[in-house]
Amino acid sequence: EVQLLESGGGLVQPGGSLRLSCAASGFTFSSFAMNWVRQAPGKGLEWVSLIGGSGGNIYYADSVKGRFTISRDNSKNTLYLQMNSLRADDTAVYYCAKVLLGTHYYFDYWGQGTMVTVSS
Amino acid sequence: EIVMTQSPATLSVSPGERATLSCRASQSVSSNLAWYQQKPGQAPRLLIYGASTRATGIPARFSGSGSGTEFTLTISSLQSEDFAVYYCQQYNNWSWTFGQGTKVEIK
């Protein structure tokens, strides 16, 4: 059974940093690209970043480019998101999501999310 | 960036009735479109991908159609567990965007 478990969320001041983790199990982690998708309170979904299975092919949404860094450790089956220079509009639930087998277009498994609150 | 626009924002439907949700892309996304269902406090669930292919375990009452810029999700006979928010999502050139969602509520 595929499982994705995010951690690392919390309250941080504007301008601060936070690192999110996503522990994966139930599939061959290194064979799949992984994503971060966020959802502000009461709002819709926003794709944040993708990383390829080997750690190459990294992409970011314009809203986080230059501030967030996605990475992965395939030996630990773990995905990361380093978030720097955080702003109030980064407040959201952050989900990690696995791509569907055979394509990077869609997300077939999601974690339950970790809440990030940026506030003074 | 491709903008996805969903309509209506809220759809009030009685159990057993048919629900039709629309999604429009600001430019063609071919058939690179998915639909997700999200219930309160839960993560999204993939329903449809490639515009019309049901994901694993998704009941046949869910169907998707369309290509280019106009897409439709149809729920043929709403069950109690189908009341939720539905999002469309497109992929194009290493960019993924979602619609703002349609809430399907009990009439």
Image (tube, coloured by chain):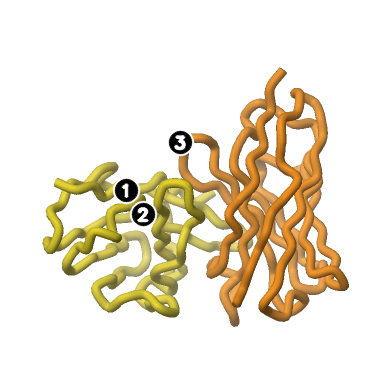
Residue drawn at (80%, 49%), measured in percent from left and top? Answer: A69
Q: Which residue is mark 1?
A: B102
Chain with yellow colouring:
B
Which quadrant would residue B57 be assigned to in this image?
bottom left
- Asked if residue A66 can be seen in this view, the reply is no
Secondary element type, mark 1? strand
Look at the numbered discs 1 and 2 and tell me whether their residues touch, using CB distance below 8 Å.
yes
Viewer-proximal residue, B37 or B95? B37
Say above or below: A23 vs A45: below
The answer to whether residue A92 is above or below residue A13 is below
Q: Which residue is mark 3?
A: A42
Foreground residue, B8 or B91? Answer: B8
**Chain letter of the residue beneath label 2 in the structure image:** B
Taking B18 as reference, is B94 left or right? right
Residue A10 visible, this orientation: yes
Which chain is assigned orange? A
